Every structure is written in C-alpha cells, then in structure tokens.
Image (cartoon, helix red, strand yellow):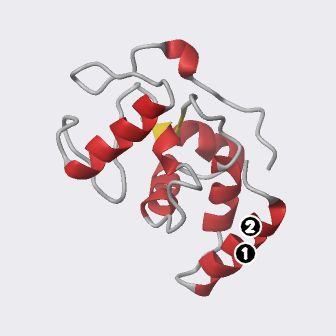
Amino acid sequence: MLGEEKLDDMKLEANAGGDGRSQPRVYTLLSQIPAGRITSYASLARALQTSPRAIGGALRNNPFAPEVPCHRVIAANGFVGGFMGDWEKAPSGINQGKKLELLRGEGVEFNVEGRLVDRRKWWDGPWKV
C-alpha cells in the first residue's frame, strides 16, 4: 500500500489537471487492492457511489500506474478489460498484454479468451472510503 504522503502528493497532482474531483478518491481505493487480487469497476463504483463508467474514466487517466494499480481492475464478468485507455475484444492488444503480464506476475491467471481463471482472486473490500 502506498504511504499517506505519496497519496497526498498524487491527490494534489491529480487535482491540477481536468476536474480532478473523483480521481484521487478512485486512486485511494486502488491502493487498497492487495497484490494478487482483483476487483471490478462495479465494485469500486459501489464503494464511491458512482458509475462503473466514471471509474473507467479515472483509470484511463491514471498517471501513477502501476504504483496505483489500475491493472487490478477487471470487468464484473471476469474479462480482463481495458488498460491505459485501450479496450480490446480479446487479450491481443499491447496495453492489454501489459495488464495481463502485470497480473500474471502477481499470480492472477486468465484463460486464452481473457477471462479470470480463479474466482477466489476477487477482492471486494472492505474499502476505506
């Protein structure tokens, strides 16, 4: 987990560009996801009382990856989903390949269709909002 000072620095930087209102909150939650575990856009959205689409927008603009681990967020149906602004139909894109590489390095496996193999890797908090 990132130190509070590092998170405070990131909040200031995130607020400097765009509206920056929801991004620091999303990044704070992302830092709570343990290595080797994943969550969904929907889970983060429920915790912050927003939409999964809003979560995706904040992740797409995450300048702190992989320290703020947006790669640990996948679709609720277990599909690997997008990464760094790209969303592919299959795990064949460069960015999606990087996401899969990061997750595999943490012990999270996906099948050839890009679906999570072990549902025990899901993590849904508890979130400290």
State the residue lying farthest toward the front: 105
| Residue occupying image coordinates x 39% and y 15% | 117
Q: Where, by quadrant of the figure, is residue 121 drawn? A: top right
Of residues 2 and 86, which is closer to you in this image?
2
Which label was assigned to residue 95?
none
Q: Report helix, strand or loop for mark 1.
A: helix
Of residues 81 and 42, which is closer to you in this image?
81
How crowded pointer 1 is (Cα within 10 Å; few <14, some 14-19, many 20+) is rated as: few
Q: Is residue 19 above or below residue 25?
A: below
Q: In this view, does 74 lie above or below 56?
A: above
Q: Are marks 1 and 2 in contact (CB under 8 Å)?
A: yes
Q: Could you tell whether 49 is left or right of 117 in the image?
A: right
Q: Position of residue 14 (x, y in %)?
A: 61, 76
Q: Is residue 63 above or below residue 50?
A: below
Of residues 123 and 49, which is closer to you in this image?
123
Q: Report helix, strand or loop for mark 2.
A: helix
Q: Is residue 50 above or below residue 23?
A: above
Q: Where is residue 104 in the image (x, y as percent from the top left)?
A: 41, 29
Q: Where is residue 101 in the image (x, y as percent from the top left)?
A: 35, 38
| Residue occupying image coordinates x 22% and y 23% | 113
| Residue occupying image coordinates x 79% and y 58% | 3
| Residue occupying image coordinates x 51% and y 40% | 72
Q: Where is residue 19 in the image (x, y as percent from the top left)?
A: 58, 80
Which label was assigned to residue 6?
2
The residues tagged by marks 1 and 2 sit, at their Cα atoms, a distance apart of 5 Å
Q: As shown in the figure, which amino acid type bears the numbered disc 2?
A: Lys
Q: Identify the residue under disc 1.
A: 9
Q: As shown in the figure, which amino acid type bears the numbered disc 1?
A: Asp
